[in-house]
């Protein structure tokens, strides 16, 4: 019988590595998955991912009967997986008895811990976005699916434009009248942001009663309900540029779907500012060569579509690459998938001229991309070790049993011979 721990650390390790805590976290994870799946109908997969699996706690309702729901407060995905990982380490690695029979189990637990570690790395370091290219175009960066940023630059620069960037995380809490001032040594002015909206639309202030946001040149940003897909939302924010020590200013609002920047004068130069999807630089360039779409016979539905591209290294080397739906390009830690095409109609048929055809590439930079393969290999090694060990033990027992039967049979024959 195992001795009960007497120290505080020992008791804490016993609790963290207990089966009861692991069972409670598994039940909590099941409820998160079940309720999150049901909630996707109303909120969409991106919002559910944020509220259920990227949060510390979840306040929701569980249906137990038609038209009957009970309120629930659950641990979010982050603490649930963290406690499961800690329990795995203490229960499956630290407190487990270290014998030959448990070697395979320990190896398998190491593999599971590596897989969970890969999930943490992916959550913290992953970058997902897309790149749209027409034939002949060349791209060196890609845009994030969800995150936005404000970029400021001097329009007089023709080459090597230096951008000053304010990431969305620095102003996404500026709802309503809340405001924040941003300064930079590279800018001869200060920037004041306020009235940030995840989804907005410019509307004329004539005949609408009291506008819900400041009016600029007879327009104001009307706050709209959030969409299921953050990628399709039109982010908006109000901006004031304080110049000449704050004695003068220019005001406007930035809309994420607006391609024309907000242009103003400051320090005797012309500056531009816009709200865009956060951009990430690639360590190589991609030049689009040709797009190919293969339809099902007699249908406009795509059976496959692919792109011929050229990967251009920073040193100038060029490598032709064929990217298909399920055959991405991997280079320098980046994965480039063929995720779409356009312009197309509702049936998926290409429309417009060949010059207007474009490819949509989904690009991910995930440092833990190979970790699942490593983890599965470790787990498989642990399972094989356990199987082989059990097989050896079984065969040894069978050999001893046959030896005992053989000896017992020989003894019986000797007794019979003596009796005769």
Image: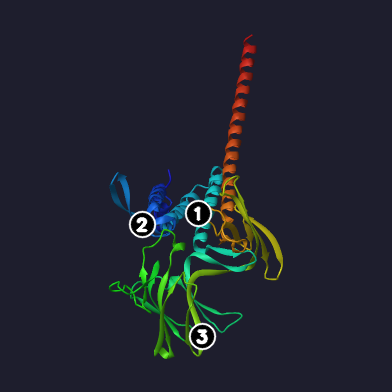
**347 lies above or below 388:** below
Q: Is residue 305 left or right of residue 16?
A: right
Q: Are marks 3 and 1 in contact (CB under 8 Å)?
A: no
Instruction: Please identify the residue farthest to the top as the structure is shown.
Output: 420
The one of 36 and 58 positioned closer to us in this rendering? 36
The quadrant of the image that shows the C terminus is top right
Asked if residue 37 shows in the view, the reply is: yes
Q: Residue 41, position in %: x, y?
A: 39, 52
The quadrant of the image that shows the N terminus is top left
SS at circle 1: loop
Q: Residue 396, position in %: x, y?
A: 61, 33
Residue at point 39% right, 56% down? 43
Q: Residue 56, position in %: x, y?
A: 39, 60
Q: Earlier in the sequence, mark 3 or mark 1?
A: 3
- Mark nearest the camera among 3 and 1 is 1
Rounded to the nearest whole Å, what is the CA distance between mark 3 and mark 1? 43 Å
Residue 58 circle label = 2
- Residue picked out by circle 1: 346
Residue at point 60% right, 25% down? 404
Q: Earlier in the sequence, mark 2 or mark 3?
A: 2
Task: Find residue 221 and report its image quarter.
Answer: bottom left
Category of crowding for the residue at label 1, using alpha-carbon neighbours closer than 10 angstroms: few (below 14), some (14–19), many (at least 20): few
Q: Residue 243, position in %: x, y?
A: 43, 88
SS at circle 2: strand
Residue 270 circle label = 3
**6 lies above or below 268:** above
Number of callouts: 3
């Amino acid at each position: 019988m195992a001795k009960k721990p007497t120290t505080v650390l020992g008791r804490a390790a016993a609790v963290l590595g207990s089966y009861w805590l692991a069972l409670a976290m598994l039940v909590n994870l099941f409820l998160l998955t079940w309720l999150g799946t049901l909630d996707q109908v109303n909120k969409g997969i991106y919002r559910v991912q944020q509220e259920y699996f990227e949060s510390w706690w979840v306040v929701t309702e569980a249906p137990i009967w038609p038209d009957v729901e009970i309120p629930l407060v659950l641990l979010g995905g982050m603490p649930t997986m963290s406690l499961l990982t800690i329990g795995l380490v203490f229960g499956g690695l630290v407190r487990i008895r270290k014998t030959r029979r448990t070697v395979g189990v320990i190896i398998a637990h190491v593999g599971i811990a590596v897989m969970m570690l890969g999930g943490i790395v992916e959550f913290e370091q992953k970058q997902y976005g897309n790149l749209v290219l027409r034939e002949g175009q060349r791209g060196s960066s890609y845009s994030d699916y969800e995150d936005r940023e404000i970029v400021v630059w001097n329009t007089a620069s023709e080459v090597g434009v230096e951008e000053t960037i304010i990431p969305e995380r620095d102003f996404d809490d500026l709802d309503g009248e809340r405001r924040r001032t941003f300064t930079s040594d590279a800018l001869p002015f200060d920037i004041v942001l306020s009235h940030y909206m995840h989804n907005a639309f410019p509307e004329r202030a004539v005949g609408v009663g009291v506008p819900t946001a400041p009016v600029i040149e007879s327009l104001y940003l009307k706050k709209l309900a959030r969409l299921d897909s953050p990628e399709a939302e039109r982010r908006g924010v109000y901006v004031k540029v304080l110049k000449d020590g704050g004695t003068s200013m220019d005001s406007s609002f930035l809309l994420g779907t607006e391609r024309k920047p907000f242009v103003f004068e400051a320090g005797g130069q012309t500056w531009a500012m816009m709200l865009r999807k956060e951009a990430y630089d690639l360590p190589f360039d991609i030049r689009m060569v040709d797009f190919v779409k293969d339809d099902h016979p007699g249908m406009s539905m795509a059976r496959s579509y692919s792109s011929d591209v050229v990967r251009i290294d920073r040193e100038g080397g060029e490598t032709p690459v064929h990217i298909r739906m399920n055959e991405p390009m991997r280079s320098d830690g980046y994965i480039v998938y063929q995720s779409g095409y356009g312009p197309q109609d509702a049936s998926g048929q290409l429309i417009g001229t060949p010059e207007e055809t474009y490819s949509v590439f989904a690009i991910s930079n995930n440092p833990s991309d190979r970790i699942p393969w490593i983890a599965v290999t470790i787990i498989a090694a642990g399972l094989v070790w356990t199987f082989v060990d059990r097989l050896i033990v079984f065969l040894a027992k069978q050999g001893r049993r046959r030896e005992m039967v053989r000896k017992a049979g020989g003894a019986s024959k000797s007794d019979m011979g003596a009796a005769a």
